[in-house]
Image (cartoon, rainbow, N blue to C red):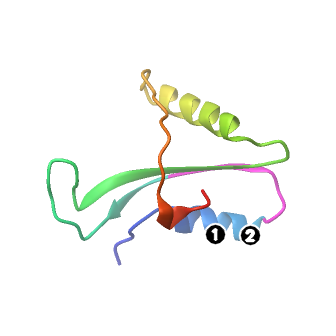
Amino acid sequence: LLRTHTTSMTIQYLAEHPREPCKIFSLGRVFRREAIDYSHLAEFYQVEGIVMEPGASFAMLVGVMREFYQRLGFEDIRVRPGYFPYTEPS
């Protein structure tokens, strides 16, 4: 079975620990049945992050993600707004 996203890993943790503050990150290979072109491949790696604690904010999540990527060696990190109606509210 080929997974199409990494959300199942984070949702499972949240279901098992519903009230505990946490920072969850999952990284994994995913597969999509899509036409291959210059911007899409059928196989790629996805990173997902969830911060759940009192006082958590989008700015906190961005800070955690920046540190995550910097520790992987990526220094030039850009955050830009996006609207994806199939994931709202997100």
Disc 2 element: helix
Disc 1 element: helix
Q: Quadrant of residue 29?
A: bottom left
Reading the image, the residue beneath label 2 is: 16
Looking at numbered disc 1 in the image, what kind of residue is underneath it? Gln
In which quadrant is the C terminus drawn? bottom right
The answer to whether 89 appears left or right of 43 in the picture is right
- The residue positioned farthest toward the left in the image shown: 37
Q: Residue at x 45, y 30 (%)?
A: 72
Q: Residues within 10 Å of mark 1 (few under 14, many from 20)?
A: few
Q: Residue at x 29, y 67 (%)?
A: 32
- The residue positioned farthest toward the top in the image shown: 75
The answer to whether 9 appears left or right of 23 in the picture is left
Distance from disc 1 to disc 2, alpha carbons, whole Å, reads 6 Å
Q: Nearer the viewer, residue 14 or 79?
A: 79
Q: Residues within 10 Å of mark 2 (few under 14, many from 20)?
A: few
Residue 74, relative to residue 87: is it above or below? above
Reading the image, the residue beneath label 1 is: 12
Q: Quadrant of residue 20?
A: bottom right
In which quadrant is the N terminus drawn? bottom left
Residues at discs 1 and 2 in contact (Cβ within 8 Å): yes
- The range drawn in magenta is 18-26
Where does the image place residue 17, in percent across and percent down from the top left?
Answer: 77, 64
Q: Is residue 19 magenta?
A: yes
Looking at numbered disc 2 in the image, what kind of residue is underneath it? Glu
Where does the image place residue 62, in percent across and percent down from the top left?
Answer: 60, 35
